[in-house]
Amino acid sequence: MHQPRIRLVRATSGAHRLREFISLTKPRVVTLILFTAVIGMLLAPGAIPVAQAVFGAIGIALLAAAAAATNCLLEAKRDAVMARTRGRPLASGRLKTTEAAAFAAGLGVAGLALLHALVNPLTMWLTLATFAGYAIVYTLLLKPRTPHNIVLGGAAGAMPPVLGWAAVTGDVSADALLLFLIIFVWTPPHFWSLALYRRNDYAKAGVPMLPVTHGMRYTRRQVLLYTLGLVAASVLPFFTRMSGALYLASALSLGAIFIAYATALCRRYSDKLARATFRYSIVYLALLFATLLLDHCL
């Protein structure tokens, strides 16, 4: 009599647990990583090997998801202290450490095997190095020890377009490194905007983020300086003939808006403005790379 209801409860419970595991992978972050990796593929010279590109994208996404899950695993105790992260499955105790570790390992092994067998060894090794850079070097060594953690650790986050490029070409060129440079310089103003309005969380968790160690005014100046550097780096594809006038106009327009946000942060800080700057930084990167691709196609 009650069997259908029992099955429904089990199905609902199973779907809920699946969502918990998916949330470990930080889907929005992985989406941005995959987006920039695919842009790297599409900007690479020559004909794109479709199967190689598809398997490359899947493999890169799997390793990115594994890195995110590993980050949650290693930071569970710290996450439990912070308002922004205490609702995560491991921090809240909804998933066990052993479950998360097995999940992350499975994703990582599957991604590496796929890249090695169906893409190329270079992409596999670069993606493995990126995984180690984020999940181990940044999370374990840099984040708890230095306020410049996001600058030094930003190299891992800047790798996706290089990985995409390597997946379809089998090498890494100067143009691929230029894409890396743009994301590398973008990372500090993006993340420090978040750290500004989450400074109390980081202080409570004992994380030496820049607003905690050097103060709000210094951090706001750094956001502006790095934003100016970002705009300078963003126009380089035009001068190396990787792009044309359409991209240059877009890079300057998008950059002017970012500079306006950063300047406003320096002059009249508010948490609301810092949050808006953080959100715009994501829109900025997505539109910048989309315009670069559009210009390339035209």
Image: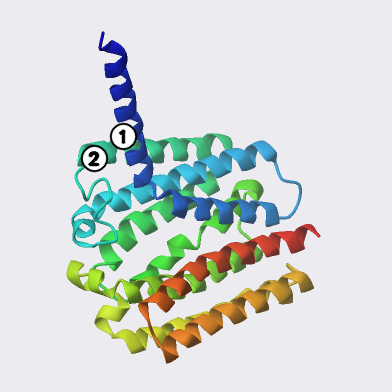
Kind of residue at badge 1: Arg
Kind of residue at badge 2: Leu
Choose top left, top right, bottom left or bottom right for residue 177: bottom right
Query: What residue did someone put label 2 on?
Result: 95
The residue lying at 54 percent from left, 48 percent from top is: 122
Residue lying furthest front in this view?
1
Between discs 1 and 2, the one toward the N terminus: 1
Q: Give SS at disc 1.
A: helix
Choose top left, top right, bottom left or bottom right for residue 77: bottom left
Q: From this view, report whether residue 277 is shown above or below residue 52.
A: below
Q: Give SS at disc 2.
A: loop
- Left/right of residue 262 with respect to residue 196 in the rendered view: right
Residue lying furthest right in this view?
298
Crowd class of label 1 (few under 14; some 14 to 19; many from 20; radius 10 Å): some
- Left/right of residue 134 with respect to residue 79 in the rendered view: right
Q: Pick the residue in front: 134 or 126.
A: 134
Residue 163 in sight: yes
Q: From this view, report whether residue 76 is shown above or below residue 193.
A: above
Choose top left, top right, bottom left or bottom right for residue 97: top left
Crowd class of label 2 (few under 14; some 14 to 19; many from 20; radius 10 Å): some
Q: Which mark is residue 242?
A: none
| Residues tagged 1 and 2 counted as in contact (Cβ below 8 A) | yes
Q: From this view, report whether residue 85 is shown above or below residue 228.
A: above
Residue 208 in sight: no
The residue lying at 70 percent from left, 59 percent from top is: 293
Residue lying furthest bottom in this view?
267
- Left/right of residue 102 with respect to residue 237 in the rendered view: left
Locate the C terminus and report the quarter of the image it occupies. Answer: bottom right
Q: How is the image coloured?
A: rainbow
Q: Nearer the viewer, mark 1 or mark 2?
A: 1
Instruction: Give the tally of numbered discs.
Output: 2
